[in-house]
Image (cartoon, rainbow, N blue to C red):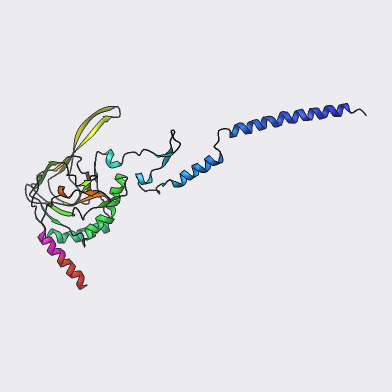
């Protein structure tokens, strides 16, 4: 029996195997070409482990900024953040129904006592015929709600910054009343009392007056148009509504009262580590009766 056919069959089998195996190896090599090596993958995982990503519903802030790989030095660098809602609106926001029923009940009960102790304003360069009282930072339920309630959470959300706090130890919370005929506030920008500047809050408790709040807000014509138009917004502030204004920012005013009355609470939020510029602040109300009222409250609580 001849061995030639078997030899030929062996050669055919070898050629076929080479023909099939080599392309597969080539495809596999091509498929993984350009993929990072294991050390690169481990380095990337290390970067991702150090990224502090906010939980769902948590505001974005430099503390929580994700990182991206720089093309220059192959190192993580912060991603540029988009402007906050307050910045997009030019430094002023109006919001209705800020406190829930429970918070509102506490505030109304507390402020009823302070309303009886309101004094004429001692000095102001822009306001006329207002009355007011200073709320106790120690035992006022209103101040406590302002520190921990719905309002501060909203402020942190619209600023995309969780570090805003009520700075009542530096700038006391005030109850203010527009009820005398002619009570008003001229056009002005709020004085900068902190570095970085604070946010001023005007919350309306009651408003049966005919006076309105106005503010100037520059608006850009379009994304490709650098020119801006200043629009004047006018509103009769609703009870339980808040106006948030960046200090040194938009000009605003309150028109002269002829009838009714408007009761508001004024307070300040600033960053935790913001520096208080004490020389820039002047007390608006002496609040002698307010102090007596606070002492009475303390005595009542001690008896309990």
Instruction: Determine if residue 103 is in view.
Output: yes
Can you say whether 235 is above or below 19 in the image? below
Q: Position of residue 139 (x, y in %)?
A: 21, 62
Q: State the residue at coordinates (23%, 49%).
A: 275
Q: Position of residue 174 (x, y in %)?
A: 16, 54
Can you say whether 147 is above or below 219 in the image? below
Magenta-drawn stretch contains 278: no
Can you say whether 151 is above or below 25 in the image? below
Closer to the camera in the image, 204 or 144 = 144
Closer to the camera in the image, 274 or 240 = 274
Closer to the camera in the image, 155 or 169 = 169
Q: Which residues are magenta?
A: 282-294
Quarter of the N terminus within the rendering: top right
Left or right of 222 in this view: 77: right
Residue positioned most to the front? 73
Dividing the picture into quarters, in which one does residue 7 lie? top right
Quarter of the C terminus within the rendering: bottom left
Q: Position of residue 284 (x, y in %)?
A: 12, 52
Left or right of 75 in this view: 177: left
Left or right of 282 in this view: 166: right
Instruction: Determine if residue 243 is in view.
Output: no
Residue positioned most to the bottom? 303
Can you say whether 248 is above or below 130 in the image? above
Q: State the residue at coordinates (20%, 73%).
A: 303
């Amino acid at each position: 029996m001849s061995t030639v056919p078997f030899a030929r069959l062996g050669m055919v089998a070898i050629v076929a195997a080479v023909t099939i195996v080599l392309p597969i190896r080539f495809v596999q090599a091509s498929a993984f070409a350009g993929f990072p090596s294991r050390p690169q993958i481990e380095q990337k995982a290390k970067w991702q482990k150090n990224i502090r990503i906010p939980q769902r519903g948590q505001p974005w802030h430099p503390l929580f900024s994700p990182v991206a790989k720089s093309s220059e030095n192959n190192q993580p660098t912060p991603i540029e953040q988009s402007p906050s809602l307050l910045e997009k609106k030019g430094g002023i926001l109006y919001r209705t129904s800020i406190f829930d029923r429970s918070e509102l009940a506490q505030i109304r009960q507390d402020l009823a006592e302070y309303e009886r102790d309101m004094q004429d304003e001692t000095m102001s360069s822009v306001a006329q015929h207002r009355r007011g009282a200073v709320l106790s930072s120690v035992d006022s339920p209103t101040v406590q709600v302002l520190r921990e309630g719905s309002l501060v959470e909203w402020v942190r959300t619209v600023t995309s910054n969780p570090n805003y706090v009520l700075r009542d130890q530096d700038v006391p919370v005030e109850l203010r009343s527009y009820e005398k005929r002619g009570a008003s506030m001229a056009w002005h920008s709020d004085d900068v009392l902190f570095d970085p500047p604070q946010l001023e809050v005007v919350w309306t408790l009651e408003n049966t007056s005919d006076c309105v709040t106005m503010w100037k807000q520059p608006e850009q014509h379009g994304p490709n148009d650098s020119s801006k138009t200043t629009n004047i917004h006018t509103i009769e502030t609703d009870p339980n509504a808040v106006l948030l204004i960046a200090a040194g920012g938009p000009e605003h005013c309150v028109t002269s009262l002829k009838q009714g009355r408007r009761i508001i609470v004024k307070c300040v939020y600033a960053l935790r580590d913001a520096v208080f510029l004490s020389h820039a602040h002047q007390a608006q109300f002496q609040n002698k009766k307010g102090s007596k009222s606070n002492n009475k409250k303390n005595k009542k609580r001690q008896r309990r």
